[in-house]
Image: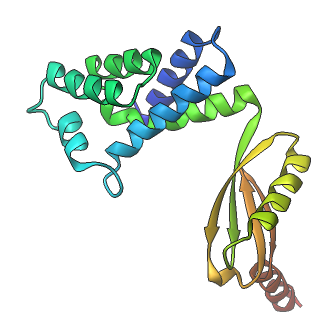
């Protein structure tokens, strides 16, 4: 089974088990799963945690002990702890990043929010970012959670991507359109 499919199945099952819980609980579990998934990341994660979770020389009980210690130290919600223990039992910890991403998407859909990747040529001020987010919220009718990236090659302007929709108001895009127009004629 592919990672995305596994991720969606486990995410939907977790969401279903938390159906009666409030929005705050969903957001808390989502944050905790994302944090644990980030620990597994090869570049920015924690090497010892990754080793304990992914190395076959660690048995299930040792993995659960590591997770229990982390859970107690960081006051992880009981639902998150049970779910991650289930992933250990089912040998699905390697899929935790995909599961966490799928759960985040499920929670976003349930609470009416979307994530936007906002690309600019230079860092935005808090006011400018707030204005962009407000405009995107008016367009989508949902709460927008921004992920801002800086790329000098856009020259100036802003490009925002929400799901499969791109709002491109960059100078680079305008130049590309002009170049294409002149080549056609």
State the image coordinates of residue 128 (x, y, percent, origin top left). 80, 67
* Residue lying at 41% horizontally and 25% vertically, measured from the top left: 75
Residue 65 image-quadrant placement: top left
Q: Is residue 4 visible?
A: no
Residue 156 image-quadrant placement: bottom right
Position of 106 with respect to 78 (left or right) is right
Position of 148 with respect to 70 (left or right) is right
Number of callouts: 0
Say which quadrant the N terminus sits in. top left
State the image coordinates of residue 175 (x, y, percent, origin top left). 80, 86
Q: Is residue 124 visible?
A: yes
Residue 23 image-quadrant placement: top right
* Residue lying at 89% horizontally and 91% vertically, measured from the top left: 185
* Residue lying at 36% horizontally and 23% vertically, measured from the top left: 84
State the image coordinates of residue 163 (x, y, percent, origin top left). 70, 48
* Residue lying at 21% horizontally and 37% vertically, measured from the top left: 54
State the image coordinates of residue 96 (x, y, percent, origin top left). 39, 34
From what the image shows, is residue 155 above or below residue 101? below
Most extreme residue toward the left, as rendered?
Answer: 57
């Amino acid at each position: 089974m592919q990672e995305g499919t596994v991720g969606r199945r486990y995410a939907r099952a977790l969401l279903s088990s938390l159906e009666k819980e409030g929005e705050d609980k969903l957001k808390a579990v989502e944050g905790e799963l994302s944090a644990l998934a980030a620990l597994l990341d090869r570049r920015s994660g924690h090497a010892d945690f990754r080793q304990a979770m992914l190395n076959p020389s660690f048995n299930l009980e040792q993995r659960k002990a590591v997770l229990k210690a982390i859970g107690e130290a960081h006051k992880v919600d009981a639902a998150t702890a049970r779910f991650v223990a289930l992933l250990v039992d089912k040998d699905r910890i390697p899929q935790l990043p995909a599961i966490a991403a799928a759960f985040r998407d499920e929670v976003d859909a349930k609470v009416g929010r979307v994530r936007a990747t906002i690309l600019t040529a230079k860092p935005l001020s808090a006011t400018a970012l707030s204005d962009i987010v407000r405009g995107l919220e008016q367009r989508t009718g949902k709460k927008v959670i921004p992920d801002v990236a800086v790329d000098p090659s856009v020259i100036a302007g802003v490009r925002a991507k929400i799901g499969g929709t791109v709002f491109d108001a960059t100078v680079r895009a305008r130049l590309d359109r002009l170049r294409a127009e002149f080549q056609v004629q």
